[in-house]
Image (cartoon, rainbow, N blue to C red):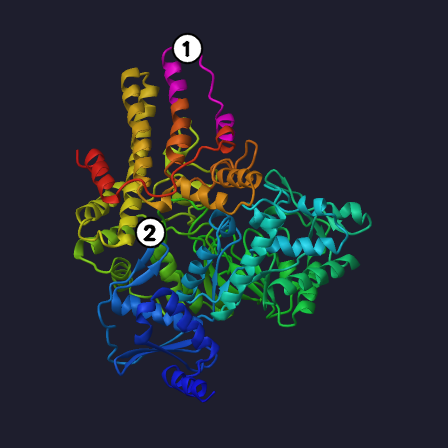
Amino acid sequence: MRKIFVAILITLSVHPVLSSEVDAAYALLSRLMPEREVEVEFQMIPDDNGNDVFELQTVNEKLVVRGNSALVMAYALHYYLRNFCNSSFSWNGQQLHIGERLPVIEQKIRKIATFDQRYYLNYCTFNYSMSFWDWERWEKEIDWMALHGINLPLALVGQEAVWQNTLRRLNYSEDEITAFLPGPSYTGWWLLGNLESWGGPVSQEWIDKQSDLQKKIVSRMKELGMQPVFQGFYGMVPNSLKIKHPTAKIHNPGKWLNFNRPGFLLPDDPLFSEIAAIYYEEQRLLYGISDYYQGDPFHEGGTSEGVNVTKAAKGIYAAMKANNPGSTWVLQAWGENPTKKLLKGIPKGKALVVDLYAEALPQWGGKASEWARKSSFEGHNWIWSEIPNFGGQTGMTAKLDQTNRDIMFALKHPNGNKMKGLGATPEGIEQDAVIYDLIFDLAWEKDTVDMDDWLEMYVSSRYGKINSEILQAWQIMRNTIYNSQYRHASGDHGSPPFESVLCARPAWNVTKVSTWGYGDMDYSPEKLLLAWEMFFKNRHQFADSDCFRCDLVNLTRQVMANHGREVYNKLQVAFDNKDINNFNVMAGKMLDLISDMDLLMSSRKEFLLGSWLEKAKKRAQSQSEMTNFEENARRLITVWTNEKHVVNDYAYREYSGLLNDYYRERWRMFIDYARGVLDGNDPRIPDFFSFEEKWVLSDEEYPSEAQENELDVVYYLGMKYFHN
């Protein structure tokens, strides 16, 4: 017994008793940099008048990281790594070439957060990127969130189990419950109240696995000091509830795209309080409690005709408050929602409105926009947020300088007194990492940053080093692809990025891929080619950086996609001039270009169709489920639904496998048709949808590991297209 006591004393002398916050910070460090644990010490300090604060200091040759929470200490650690070590963590890998000893901080650094809340994720992200994530991938993402100081992440995984348990208590059969639940690629739109059942059925094993996954996600988020935003009950119910309760006040919100929306149970119906109480109890039993609940009635065109919206909002919040008296209702500002009538039904201070698209169509009232509100959000707190990506598309785009200006403009505006935070609400992630670093760095600034200095820091930390040419290349990128002008006062309603015509459903006069795509290139492709030349020239010098290799491939893809527009235009000119010889030449070049882009993308795991499909198949528990999950994954990024619709190709991806077998094949069909026209025949117009649907239902396997060396394939394509 005495030996055990002595051992405990020795242990305590080496590792003193730690708070849970400090323990969480050490656990994060152990996951990311276990070899550096002995060189870092975490210490708790009080907040600064309610604001997050961190300090960095070198004491006795050890880096001391102080903060008022584990999350703040995590951001402080990443701040140190980027600003002092030329190191960073990103979706494209870690960049850690620190040296034998951690760099010394001569003078203590202290930074206070300007924004209390740093919000992250979008309902769409849970499908366009996360549909089939496992715990290993989620664990990395949560660590990434912590390193970026995100404290208010949306947490929507595992809602199938909440609804299953709720509906069981409402005397639903298992088959009736299954008929309400969507497939794994469509949960976001289900929770938004846009559809039910589509993409299913899902098995009990899937429901249980997602529930277990959410428990791990929520536990880790809370361990690190995040406040997960849960799905609230806002009246969404299965349409079948009308049959079970024919006298219940269930409103029909209409259709979304080609889908029947779930019903909306009016909060003044006694059944609403009953279901809400069951729903929140089941959610609490599974995942605990949160202070933040999200849910948007009448999302994206849902009709509220005949509904007293203010009264309904009061009822929705009352049920939320009964579950947790400290609840805040989180709402998305998107289109007309949330309406003034709805906001008036929520007590002041109990709503938090996320202005989703503030970089392009701000609603908070400080900048001219067709969505702008003169009274901001009826006096409620709000968050400035940006949508860096739509649909998980691969094109490069961002608004670096404008984001820098707009956030601080909003902060200093009279309406900024209710601006409680900032955020990123991407529909898809793992692209254009630079904009996320900028947004969440600005949470700690009281004014705009010097973009020249900030960009140099970012590039140095992303690649581990920098030289004048790579910095110049990034400055060109900053002023071209990362200076996107979409959604400006010109009235253009295109969504970023500028889309590659090579991925469009073939036709003449094509300018974009998706219905809401951005058709006009708003930068000079010649300038971007100069940036690529600098990357190409320095490819060996920076070859040890995985992030550089990823960016090199992606930038090569972008300049090739831009070149594709030129080839397509020449193809059309040849057709219009009935120049069959030149038409055949340009047709060959266009098809070759798509195949070469497929070859390029095969050099990186991030850009493989096989990787996307493999994630889906690995999460399945049976052959039938594997077939359904693969169809979900294929359908989402192509036709989206199962009929001809405007949403086709919304989530198009320039993936290896998809480029050759899907986009190239469509263009081959069209070229054969056009050639038949030039030959004087009467060819049948290609049935693209039948081809697309056949591909969605196919089971051809694709590689899930890189097939080529990035540097070799970039050299080959560079010499072929730009150095010939």
- Closer-to-camera residue (683/181): 181
Cα distance in 3D space between marks 2 and 1 = 47 Å
Position above or below: 723 against 457: above
* Residue 16, quarter of the rendered image: bottom left
* Residue 42, quarter of the rendered image: bottom left
Horizontal side of residue 500 vs 461, given as left or right: right
- Closer-to-camera residue (670/574): 670
Residue 81 lies in the magenta-colored region: no
Position above or below: 333 against 420: above
**Local SS, label 1:** loop
Identify the amino acid type marked 1.
Asn
**Local SS, label 2:** loop
| Residue stretch rendered in magenta on the structure | 671-693
Residue 662 in percent (x, y) is at 42, 31
Horizontal side of residue 59 vs 75, given as left or right: left
Mark 2 packing: few (<14 Cα in 10 Å), some, or many (20+)? some
- Count of marks overlaid on the render: 2
Give the residue drawn at x 40%, y 39%: 519
Horizontal side of residue 245 vs 695, given as left or right: right
Task: Please indicate, yes or no, whether residue 297 appears anywhere in the rendered image.
Answer: yes
Residue 44 in percent (x, y) is at 42, 80
Identify the amino acid type marked 2.
Asn
The residue sitting at the top extreme is: 680
User: Would you name the residue on which mark 1 appears?
Assistant: 681
Nearer mark to the viewer, of 2 and 1: 1
User: Would you name the residue on which mark 2 appears?
Assistant: 483
The C terminus sits in image quarter: top left
Horizontal side of residue 706 vs 154, given as left or right: left
Position above or below: 581 against 422: above
Give the residue drawn at x 67%, y 67%: 323
- Closer-to-camera residue (128/176): 176
